Image (tube, coloured by chain):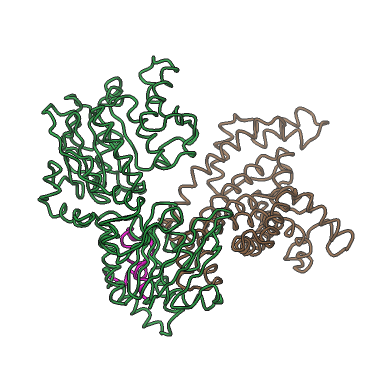
Chain colours: A green, B brown
Amino acid sequence: MSVLEVAALRIAAGMREVVRDLSFTVAEGETLALVGESGSGKSATARAVIGLLPPGLRQSGGRIAFAGQGLSALSPARLRALRGPGMGMVFQEPMTSLNPAQRIGAQMEEGLALHRTLDARSRRQACIAMLERVGITDPERRLQAFPHEFSGGMRQRIMLASVMLLRPRLLIADEPTTALDTLTQAEVLSLMKELAREQGSAILLITHDLGLVARHADRALVMQAGQAVEEGAAAPLLAAPRQPYTQALVAALPRRGPSRALPQAAPLIEARDLSVAYPGRGGWFRRAAPMQAVQGVSLSIHPGEVVALVGGSGSGKTTLGRAMLRLLPASGGSLLFRGQDVTASTGPALLDFRLACQIVFQDPYSSLDPRMRVRDIVAEPLRLPAGMPIPERQRRAEAMLAEVGLGGLGDRYPHALSGGQRQRVAIARALVRNPAFVVADEAVSALDATVRKQVIALLRDQQRKRGFACLFVTHDLGVVEEIADRVVVMQSGRIVEEGPRDQVLDAPAHDYTRALLDASLRLPATA
Amino acid sequence: MALYVLKRLLAAIPTLLLVAASVFFLMRLIPGDPALLVLGDAATPEAIADLRASMGLDRTLPVQFALWLSQLLGGDLGFSITSGEAVGPLILDRFGVTAAIVLAAVAIAVLLAVPAGMLAAWKQGSWGDIAAVSLATLLLSIPSFWLGLILLLVFGLKLGWVPVVGYVTFAENPWAALHYILLPIATLALVEIGVLIRMARASTIEVLRLDYIAHARAKGVPESRVLLRHAFPNAFAPTLTLVGLVLGNLLGGIAVIETVFTLPGLGRLLVDAIFARDYPVIQGVMLFIALVYVSVNLAVDLLYPVFDPRVAAE
């Protein structure tokens, strides 16, 4: 018996169809993954199932039936009665999916009050029990807290608790862990699966992450441009994809590159006992103690070496990356570049250091000036040192753009480019001066799998060709497999493990590294 | 909490001092001599000099400023040059008129415009929404004095429902007083409704797009409750900021409307004082306006966490 039946579903945005002729069923207690990249129509499908398409989208055809009952025939009141105990939904962004103006307890109780005949005390008891179940400590006090008092992972647990409290027969999870770091991701997903199993709920899992599908889904449906491409039991489908698109998706999964032997050389850049502290929040009469983000870290990077700096959110990895470029001031220790102490250098010495180092940021939407043409963005680093004539700068920028695969697009503005193309612009801007050292700060985290694969390949090829040293800050161990020579693992502002890539990934010495590896969603070895 | 309020009020002292200093010195840059204005063209130079001396205007500017400040610290705002009244009570008296009109108008505007804006956002693109937006734009584009004059013409002259000129205080005759301030309140409320509908609509549209609204609907929450419990508190927070700014602005005097309706409000007091170079009154009123601004904004900041707990008062 299927909980959900979708037949010939069509969803239109104005005249354009974003979902075409999509049919699938979800059986009682089963987990079906809708897999696809951004724009494949998977989220729109999820919203249509629960009848909450965002403004601008409408269902233009097809039938959605829950437990044999067509949804379009239901009155708004009957549909509301179904939402909650029939279908529950977990959203992607834990920062915006809980009402910031309402206490956790009130938000959790709301569904119970609507759908169950319980008195206030039993509702409260149910909420407390559920919070306890999802691992929130001190649940009685926490009921009084507002969402902003919790971390992203905690909010997603609360979200899950609030939805599962109504024991839905179908749980729709729209990219439920995409916004979380690797470790939290694994915890929240396991929790979701456990709760669904306990309550016998089926799950419609919307995701772009094949690793997650392999680990958590019974069946998978691959979508591309609004249409189903391939459907089947999850494990065989990923092990032996039949359709070219699925094959491309699977091929985009990280594969370990060959390890390289690098010539021994003096370190290019070296952090010695480096500390970075964020000042405490200032009060009127006293100042809170500073937050130690990086605590006495020593790290040297050799010419031409790619070092992956790995850790969860809040581990201090981004802070360390920025401090090594002196984008953040060190509060202790020293920074050496080509043997010279640059910790506090100013004037020409600092300029030399700055010209030799570059950074690629995580978010290609905010790291490019929206009012500059792409060619000018790439040419800008060539303005220093002064002297290069403008036509020469423009010519080099064009050549660099061609090299990153954006030849002929120099006249465009960033908004006219896709996310992947923008990140290529950011890379071109970083490399146009032939830097000696590049920090890539989660440079591919915001990209879809296939695009990510291409951008990583571009970075690797450019690195091999130009031979710059690179510090790749990431929480994604897949990237490490592909590109790193050496891995440095950070936790709570300290380096806990460091070594050649194969050694760290195959024989991790530290518990935290092992936990990270376990949590990282890689395909089983058969794939 | 009390400590926070105290801190905020203490923090306003430099602002008030700055206002005091700039008003004092800027006023003296405007040509014109109060003594001359009081005595008229026919006065002898000796008489003018005597009057200037008795006003303290013969001393150097820094000395005058120091004297005024020390007076101020004693809570004394001085006396009006033209009428001889004490400035403090004069301001409070006139402020009562302005405050009655402004508070009533803004309250009416909020009560009408916020629900209207929210409903328009909820039914975005519907005829009701288009009507609300058009009304808001229309109200925004009408100058308040023109609207006031038209209302006077229709309800005062043609229909004769309300008196056209004058003012009676509430203490004298509440029923009559109400008649006098009815049209000014309506005028002001209509203008502010335009601003507030737009603001409430825009912030509600923003909020309705967010996941927690979808989350509430996905729980089966009825639309009325989605709007009241989930959208309203979040959408009202930015509107509240605007209301604070509007209130601060209007409480400082609504000279144009007070002039149209011949009401003895704070705005008129200030304008008349400027024409008469009545330095003590001008300085007193300006300081008072600054104080009102600071207080209104403090009140808004204290109220804000009720709607947005992320912004705690401390």
Whether residue A352 is visible, yes or no, is yes
Residue A146 percent across, percent down from the top left: 39, 64
> Residue at 49% of width from left, 45% of height from top?
B13
> In the image shown, does A193 or B186 lie closer to the viewer?
A193
> In the image shown, does A63 or B273 lie closer to the viewer?
A63
Residue A331 to residue A117: above or below: above
> In the image shown, does B226 or A192 lie closer to the viewer?
A192
Residue A352 percent across, percent down from the top left: 28, 22
Residue B92 percent across, percent down from the top left: 65, 55
Q: Which part of the image, by quadrant, shows the C terminus of chain A?
A: bottom left
| Residue A157 lies in the magenta-colored region | yes
Whether residue B240 is visible, yes or no, is no
> In the image shown, does B267 or B196 lie closer to the viewer?
B196
Q: Which part of the image, by quadrant, shows the N terminus of chain A?
A: bottom left
Q: Farthest residue in the right direction?
A: B158
In this picture, residue B274 sits left or right of residue A387: right
Q: Farthest residue in the front direction?
A: A242
User: Is the magenta region chiefly helix, strand or loop?
Assistant: helix
The magenta segment is: A138-165
Quarter location, residue A216: bottom left
Residue A377 percent across, percent down from the top left: 43, 29
